[in-house]
Image (cartoon, rainbow, N blue to C red):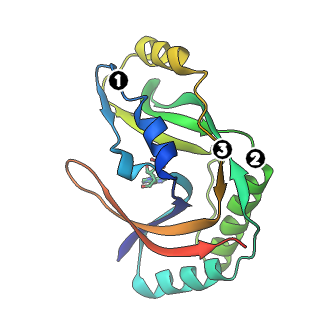
Amino acid sequence: MMRLFVGLELPWDVKERLSGLAGSLQGARWVPPENYHLTLRFIGETPHHVAEEIDHALAALRLRPFDLRLTGLGAFHKGGRPTQLWVGAARCEPLDRLQGKIETALQRVGLPAEKRRFTPHVTIARLDNVSEASAAGFIGQHNLFAAEPFTVGEFVLFSSRLGKERSVYTAEVEYELA
Ligand code: 3AM
């Protein structure tokens, strides 16, 4: 079995800009810059033969490269508490189209539909016991954040190994946009 997700790798200069946001927020576990990514579709534990079918389906997608800009901050909540701090992506039609095509391709392979709405984001911290007020304060302080736009020339099938300290993400297959 492999734990899989589809996402975008980020250029180093963008990762550097994002890492500049890591600062004082009690209870934040900052994501190490090498782990920054934008998830297009979480897949989860997958038998090897299904992973091969997924690979074939993704390899058949034909889409053009496009520009993407990361901007703004936000948080995801669970049970009324902030759990995840993220940088968003500027509204981008080609990104939505890519995500939609991936979703359709995976459903054709037989995966159940993703029920959650696509909220393009890069997680920069996981939050333990951070109050809504301090998360909102941090977001307000950095809300004008905008990284340089970059060209998305590929998307990636990642495997993820969950560790105690940090997860290890490996780019298993890269799919070029051309
Ligand atoms: O891109 P982010 O960091 O928001 O939280 C996991 C991470 O999201 C998410 O998939 C991304 C790559 O690991 N993830 C983990 N388990 C998940 C699940 N059961 C999940 N997303 C949806 N359902």
For marks 3 and 2 on the same chain, the one whose residue lies earlier in the sequence: 2
> Residue 53 appears at what percent x and percent y?
55, 85
Q: Amino acid at mark 2?
A: Cys
Q: Secondary structure at mark 3?
A: loop
Graded by Cα atoms within 10 Å as few (under 14), some (14 to 19) or many (20 or more), the crowding at tag 1 reads: few
Is residue 37 in view?
no
* CA distance separating discs 1 and 3: 23 Å
- Badge count: 3
Confirm or deny contact between disc 1 and disc 2 (CB under 8 A): no
Tell me the tag on residue 23: 1
Figure quadrant of the N terminus:
bottom left
Figure quadrant of the C terminus:
bottom right
Left or right relative to 107: residue 84: left
For marks 1 and 2 on the same chain, the one whose residue lies earlier in the sequence: 1
Q: Which residue is mark 2?
A: 92
Confirm or deny contact between disc 3 and disc 2 (CB under 8 A): no
For marks 1 and 3 on the same chain, the one whose residue lies earlier in the sequence: 1
Tell me the tag on residue 48: none
> Residue at the location (51% across, 14% down)?
141
> Residue 163 appears at what percent x and percent y?
23, 55
